[in-house]
């Protein structure tokens, strides 16, 4: 009886009188009546209008039926327009009774019952939720440790799904804390050392990370100044590898002392390649010819470009495998990295092609011919994202004084290691010393997708003696730098600060896409510095010595001895 009594009180607390209850008919019948009346009257008036035009009757000459139809039209329109405001009017005329007024015995309804009384109500995303004080006022609850304990137990027991905590509580930080404690109890493992406080969990809701329980700390170091295209940049690098920032910084010093580096961005196109299937290989070939026909490109471009303000189709290339056709779309994407943008354009185009080729079956929006987050020859040859070449001439004196080696040794080592050695290993785009080190560190610091380091690190490093062998010409060619300055992790506070340090934060309104292109050239410039320094360390026999000095923790060594 007590349980039923409490349940009835909770139901009474959540119920309210609706304005629609005063209608003579049930709400769905009333709506159906006015919808039918509205469209019937519109149809009648259109017929009368057409009849008057055919008979050359002035439109202002009306009959009684015309007047009645117009009045009915106005009345039904007002009802339908006002229907959507019934709930709002009701909330003013009949305010909802507070929870405290429902019962005289406040102890019979626990704080946990109060929290979960609206379990099935519409969920409020944290980013759109009211401030905490207002939210708690609405829910009529007081946040206490006892209350959180009840929710933790419910999560552990499976009564409340962990992924639903943000929407149920309206407090993202609190949801993360409860999820964290529940996880520790379920697994029996401690998360001590994984920070919880000091992070804006609302900023990641629905776009960066689901079911957070904390965040990982990665130190950010600065390499530079990098003198690139007559501008100086302080390059942020998030890494836990000792020597990496110091080595890149030494490369920046050598470039700066030699007058700087220059870069050229020679291609800018993100790709997406769906796979479609036909009943026969002949039909697949027909679509291939249709897509690659220059006469059809303008029409396809209009369809593709209609999905975005910035996405602009550049080319379409196809590959056939039996009855299957792989269609590689390439397009510019402004200051965004552009995967979502190009995917929307591809979907638009596939819908259009389905009308032209009704026997086409779309097997997947991505058929791995793109190719995203995987080493692929198509990216190495055709490029993906931003394609950049960066070069510098390092004087002989700088090679000796800063890099502690000589030009001839660097040239020979580059040929044996980066070119011949990589070829012997069957490398795909890996004709470099450690481009991925620099790319990953900058990507993490600036909010890029770290997984795209795979193709973004495709790089060939070239070195040759110039000026009668006195100086060193060094270059890196990187055809697949995939970066953006808007969207994804770029909007987080720390990553946004690093982008701001480089002068490429957000979208460039005056020249859309220029911020992302500049970021790509900075990445290439930093890779050039990193390649130059590491190759010099290897040539001079300094690599092991420096890593033993800077990449070994004294604490770890002490613990090993003990």
Image: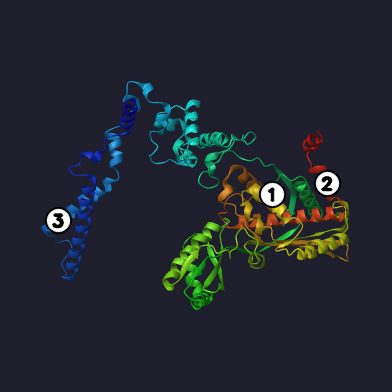
Q: Which residue lies furthest to the left in this view?
A: 64
Question: In this image, 72 relative to 176: left or right?
Answer: left
Eyeballing the image, is 341 above or below 122?
below
Q: What element carries label 2?
A: helix
Question: Relative to residue 401, is residue 462 depicted above or below?
Answer: below
Label 1 vs 3, first from the N-terminus: 3
Instruction: Using the image as rendered, state which of residue 150 and residue 314 is in the foreground.
Output: 150
Residue visible at 85% across and 61% down in the picture: 471
Quarter of the image where the C terminus is located: top right
Q: Mark 2 points at which residue?
A: 546
Mark toward the viewer: 1 or 3:
1
The residue identified by callout 1 is 441
Tag 3 near tag 2, CB within 8 Å: no
The residue that label 3 is drawn on is 67
Q: Would you say 469 lies left or right of 425 here?
A: right
* Mark nearer the N terminus (1 vs 2): 1
């Amino acid at each position: 009886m007590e349980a039923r009594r409490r349940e009835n009180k909770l139901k009474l607390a959540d119920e309210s009188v609706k304005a629609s209850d005063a209608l003579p008919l049930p709400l769905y019948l009333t709506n159906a009546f006015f919808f039918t009346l509205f469209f019937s009257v519109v149809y009648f008036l259109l017929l009368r209008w057409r009849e008057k035009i055919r008979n050359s009757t002035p439109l202002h000459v009306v009959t009684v039926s015309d007047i009645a139809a117009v009045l009915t039209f106005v009345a039904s329109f007002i009802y339908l327009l006002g229907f959507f405001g019934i709930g709002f009017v009701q909330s003013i005329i009949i305010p909802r009774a507070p929870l405290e007024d429902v019962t005289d015995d406040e102890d019979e309804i626990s704080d946990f019952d109060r929290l979960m009384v609206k379990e099935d109500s519409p969920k409020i995303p944290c980013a759109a939720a009211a401030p905490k004080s207002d939210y708690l006022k609405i829910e009529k609850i007081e946040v206490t440790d006892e209350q959180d304990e009840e929710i933790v137990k419910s999560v552990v027991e499976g009564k409340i799904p962990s992924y639903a905590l943000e929407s149920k509580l309206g407090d993202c930080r609190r949801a993360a804390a409860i999820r964290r404690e529940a996880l520790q109890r379920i697994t029996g493992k401690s998360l001590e050392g994984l920070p919880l406080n000091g992070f804006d969990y609302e900023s990641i809701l629905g776009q960066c990370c689901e079911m957070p329980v904390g965040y990982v700390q990665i130190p950010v170091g600065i390499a530079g100044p990098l003198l690139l295209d007559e501008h100086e940049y302080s390059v942020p690098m998030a890494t836990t590898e000792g020597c990496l920032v110091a080595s890149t910084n030494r490369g920046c010093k050598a470039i700066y002392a030699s007058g700087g580096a220059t870069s050229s961005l020679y291609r800018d196109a993100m790709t997406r390649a769906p796979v479609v299937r036909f009943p026969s290989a002949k039909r697949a070939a027909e679509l291939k010819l249709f897509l690659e026909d220059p006469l059809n490109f303008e029409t396809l471009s209009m369809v593709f470009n209609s999905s975005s303000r910035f996405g602009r189709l550049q080319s379409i290339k196809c590959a056939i495998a039996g009855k299957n056709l792989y269609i590689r779309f390439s397009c510019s994407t402004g200051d965004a990295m552009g995967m979502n943008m190009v995917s929307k354009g591809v979907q638009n185009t596939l819908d259009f092609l389905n009308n032209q080729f009704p026997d086409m079956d779309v097997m997947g929006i991505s058929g791995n011919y793109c190719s995203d987050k995987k080493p692929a020859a198509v990216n190495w040859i055709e490029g993906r994202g931003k394609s950049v070449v960066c070069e510098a001439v390092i004087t002989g004196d700088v090679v000796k004084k800063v890099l502690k080696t000589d030009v001839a040794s660097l040239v020979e080592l580059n040929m044996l290691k980066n070119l011949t050695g990589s070829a012997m290993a069957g490398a795909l785009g890996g004709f470099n010393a450690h481009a991925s080190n620099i790319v990953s560190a900058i990507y993490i610091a600036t909010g890029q997708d770290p997984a795209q380091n795979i193709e973004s690190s495709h790089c060939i490093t070239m070195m040759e003696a110039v000026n009668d062998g006195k100086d060193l010409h060094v270059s890196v060619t990187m055809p697949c730098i995939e970066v953006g300055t808007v969207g994804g992790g770029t909007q987080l506070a720390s990553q946004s600060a690093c982008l701001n340090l480089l002068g490429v934060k957000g979208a460039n309104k005056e020249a859309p896409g220029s911020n992302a292109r500049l970021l790509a050239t900075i990445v290439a410039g930093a890779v050039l510095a990193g390649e130059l320094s590491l190759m010099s360390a290897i040539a001079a026999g300094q690599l092991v010595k420096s890593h033993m000095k800077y990449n070994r923790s004294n604490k770890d060594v002490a613990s090993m001895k003990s």
